[in-house]
Image (cartoon, helix red, strand yellow):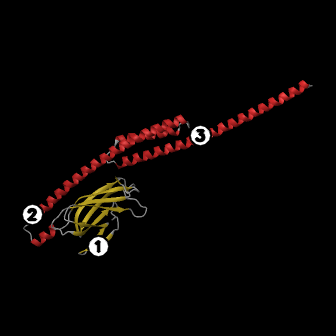
Amino acid sequence: MENSQKSSTGLKIGLGLLLVLFLGASFVASKYYNEGKETEKALISEKKQVMNDLNNMAKQYDEAIAASEVKNQDLIAARDRITGLMDSLKVSQNSVNSLWRYKKKFLALQDEMDVLMVENDKLKVENQYLATSLDSTQVQLAERTVFTDSLLVQNTELANVVEDAAALQTVGLVGMGVIERSSGKQIPTERARRSDKIKVCFTVAKNMLTEAGDKELYVQVIDPKNNVLGSNEQIQFDGQTLNYSLISRFNYENRNLNVCEYISVLDDSKFEEGRYKINVFNDKELISSSEFALK
């Protein structure tokens, strides 16, 4: 009888221990399961952040490539490497080791982008310097032309000589489409649909015979459909009507003066594709013309 009671007590103790072990194992398993879910959630979030960073980097390359007048093959190759890495990351496993490898590649590509962007900015500065040098040469030629013309009219009536020689002249007239970023940065473009504004630039040539002070010229921009863009207002000169896009007002100090003006699209419309014509008038006199095209 005593042995039977001992056996019953031992059995109860054993079952109790097994129950405790089972509950403990269940608790540990549940804890590891929950930790695994949290880890997976964190990895998915981190993977999404890396994907966003790569996408932003690819957009910066696209903007730099679009802004380059000549295709920069280094920028294009770097952009393609980022695109390839993004495609690979999309199908990768959500593991710590896998994600760490992609973050290392991202950091390396970021260092490469810093170097390439510095080199690209340097090239743009050099191109701008060359363009400025060319404009300076054109201005010098214009000054010589004005001087030569003044010599050729010595035999004409003095009043006419003074009047003609004193008239403002412009050189280097150019037009282009520009993309305007929210930061104010402007990027030249030949794409009509991407253009936010049309930029018109010219140089008012130095002329010591012209009286210094506030001056104005009339700028006319005509689109491929023969519409006058901008304000499209009218002014009368001796019975003649001039439709102009804008009035360029500036202070003239008897020296070369660079002027740039802008024309925006009306409402939500876009610029037309085709050839645009630019005319600059000094009162009723046409003093400069140029053309450019938007694709």
Task: Identify which residue is drawn at 29% across, 49% down.
Answer: 125
- Residue 176 circle label: none
- Residue 40 circle label: 3
Q: Can you see residue 73?
A: yes
Q: Is residue 10 above or below residue 50?
A: above
Q: Is residue 197 above or below residue 164?
A: above
Q: Is residue 294 above or below residue 81?
A: below
Alpha carbon distance from label 3 to label 1 = 71 Å
Which sits earlier in the primary sequence, circle 2 or circle 3?
Answer: 3
Which sits earlier in the primary sequence, circle 1 or circle 2?
Answer: 2
Q: Nearer the viewer, residue 84 or 279?
A: 84
Task: Tell me whether circle 1 and circle 2 mark residues in contact (CB < 8 Å).
Answer: no
Alpha carbon distance from label 1 to label 2 = 33 Å
Alpha carbon distance from label 2 to label 3 = 85 Å
Q: Amino acid at mark 2?
A: Leu
Residue holding disc 1: 235
Task: Identify which residue is drawn at 80% across, 31% down.
Answer: 15
Where does residue 31 sit, x and y in percent of width and height?
Answer: 66, 38
Label 3 environment density (alpha carbons within 10 Å; few <14, some 14–19, many ≥20): some
Q: Mark 3 or mark 1, which is nearer to you?
A: 3
Where does residue 164 sit, x and y in percent of width and height?
Answer: 15, 68
- Residue 151 circle label: 2
Query: Which secondary structure, mark 2?
Result: helix
Task: Tell me whether circle 2 and circle 3 mark residues in contact (CB < 8 Å).
Answer: no
Where does residue 157 sit, x and y in percent of width and height?
Answer: 9, 71
Q: Mark 1 or mark 2, which is nearer to you?
A: 2
Q: Mark 2 or mark 3, which is nearer to you?
A: 3
